[in-house]
Image (tube, coloured by chain):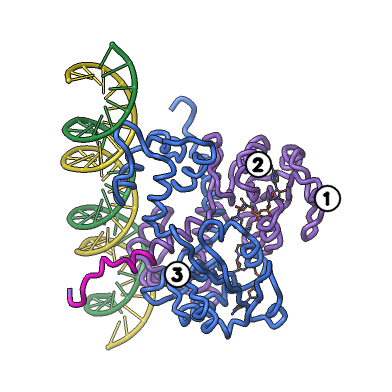
Chain colours: A purple, B blue, C green, D yellow
Amino acid sequence: MYVQVLESFKREGTPVVSSELLARTCNVNPSQIRKDLAYFGEFGVRGVGYHVQDLISAIKRSLGVDRMWKCALVGVGNLGKALLRHREFKYRGFDIVAAFDCDPFKIGEEVIGLEVVCTRRLKETARDLGIEIGLITTPPDRAQRAANFLVEAEIKGIINFAPARITLPADVHVEYVDFFHHLYAVSFSITLDQRPKAKAIGD
Amino acid sequence: MYVQVLESFKREGTPVVSSELLARTCNVNPSQIRKDLAYFGEFGVRGVGYHVQDLISAIKRSLGVDRMWKCALVGVGNLGKALLRHREFKYRGFDIVAAFDCDPFKIGEEVIGLEVVCTRRLKETARDLGIEIGLITTPPDRAQRAANFLVEAEIKGIINFAPARITLPADVHVEYVDFFHHLYAVSFSITLDQRPKAKAIGD
DNA sequence: CGCCTCTTGTTAAAAGTTTCACATAATTAG
DNA sequence: CTAATTATGTGAAACTTTTAACAAGAGGCG
Ligand SMILES: NC(=O)c1ccc[n+]([C@@H]2O[C@H](COP(=O)([O-])OP(=O)(O)OC[C@H]3O[C@@H](n4cnc5c(N)ncnc54)[C@H](O)[C@@H]3O)[C@@H](O)[C@H]2O)c1
Ligand SMILES: NC(=O)c1ccc[n+]([C@@H]2O[C@H](COP(=O)([O-])OP(=O)(O)OC[C@H]3O[C@@H](n4cnc5c(N)ncnc54)[C@H](O)[C@@H]3O)[C@@H](O)[C@H]2O)c1
């Protein structure tokens, strides 16, 4: 979130931000920001604030996103194609260099110049290309199978877009992207507001 | 997460789960689950566990997802179209009943039987249809504008897929879906593992 | 050059969350 | 019907995160 906000400050031409300004923009407490950053180092200048570009670089270095990561996508359907077509990923350090599917009608097809490869060839292909992160966009009941292929290829990080839990060795990291979590959260917030717990006016 | 896991238990035909089993599947502590559920009510049976279907219903009722929510999508691009084509949303209680875009070439186009409407007609259309939740899939620099239109239409919840913060009145709830957060998280985990903090073998 | 202002980095206190441990209730077996 | 077994719901303890408070460092101004 800090990187996202700092990059918009950078685009606006703001050279320096205080934890106070950054906090206001992110809807958090200024101490929070100073604590978070202190965990990785001393990036600010007392009495001045943080130099935007320097802070972006420092955070990115701390998170390991100061280099290009090679990614593979498994499941070239609706969502998979949207991701493949998205140039932003490469621009921001995540290059999707291979796409896999098990559907014979999809294998061989090209999506923005990338050939869809059979999932059975995932292991060799991923290893040859030096892929480190896998994106799963198969249907939920195929997510575990896709994950297994990725683990075989010695991939160490997975983003799972399918609404299904997967089990993995301890050294493989997974992030779940589930749109329903967010929809449920919004539904809950609206419902809470509208529920007639209704403190009467004046209370 | 609990709903997601419980629904897979349901599909497998498991009628009852213990907090212990549910915890193992979700990679959390059993007490955590009992505490979380206790916040909303007493849904289990002592000595037995939780009846899967009953628990799904109870959680959904607690979160306000025991009904259909009408949604609108703003920005019919790559990602927007993928979402519109996704049947699962309606099936799970979130019906996208309107799609808006500002591009004259897109207005009038149909995506799975839904006509793309001009963003300027958002307010009237959304009100007429009784829309409650908005999905923003415009480019990041247009996200605030899209949000403003949604607020005008008296929408109370927003899911923002654009990597940009937006400011809203206090009674409008927003959830940010940012794939980069997840990619950064995975990058960080892998980097940590590989960094030569290397406790020597035997330590 | 010293004083004043500003904002960081950090220590300590407050608040929140997770886990443990066990009393309580349901079910089954004897 | 009682005892043994099981797994929930919950109060208290352990732990984590967040916030507040302030000392320390940087820069500007008279
Ligand atoms: N489309 C969306 O907007 C959207 C939104 C939220 C979540 N999702 C989730 O993302 C996933 C993909 O959705 P979608 O709409 O793209 O579905 P889709 O059916 O369009 O695409 C799935 C693709 O995965 C391929 N596939 C199936 N099994 C495979 C396997 N074992 N190995 C490799 N490829 C395999 C299929 O051939 C197909 O091309 C689903 O789990 C869905 O729930 C999608
Ligand atoms: N495509 C992906 O896989 C992906 C992944 C992650 C994040 N995102 C984010 O999702 C958003 C959309 O991505 P995309 O790839 O679909 O982009 P896109 O350019 O394909 O689509 C954007 C659409 O928004 C419309 N639009 C622009 N301004 C508008 C406005 N003021 N009102 C209404 N409509 C407007 C455009 O006409 C276009 O149709 C972006 O913010 C992107 O960063 C996309």
Distance CA(mark 3)–CA(mark 2): 34 Å
Query: Do the residues under discs 1 and 3 have CB atoms within 8 angstroms?
Result: no
Specify start and end residues of the magenta stretch as a single range: A190-202
Q: Position of residue A59 (x, y in %)?
A: 49, 58
Q: Chain of mark 3?
A: B
Q: Given the image, on which type of amino acid does mark 1 rest?
A: Gly
Distance CA(mark 2)–CA(mark 1): 19 Å
Q: Nearer the viewer, residue A25 or A123?
A: A123
Tell whether position A162 is magenta: no
Q: Which residue is mark 3?
A: B157
Tell whether position A193 is magenta: yes
Q: Secondary structure at mark 3?
A: strand
Q: Residue at x 46, y 79 (%)?
A: B151
Q: Which residue is mark 1?
A: A108
Cβ(mark 2) to ligand 1 < 8 Å? yes
Q: Which residue is mark 2?
A: A146
Q: Chain of mark 1?
A: A
Share a chain, discs 3 and 2? Answer: no
Q: Earlier in the sequence, mark 2 or mark 1?
A: 1
Looking at the image, residue B56 sits to the left or right of residue B139; the answer is left
Q: Given the image, on which type of amino acid does mark 3 rest?
A: Gly
Q: Nearer the viewer, residue A127 or B20?
A: B20
Q: Given the image, on which type of amino acid does mark 2 rest?
A: Ala
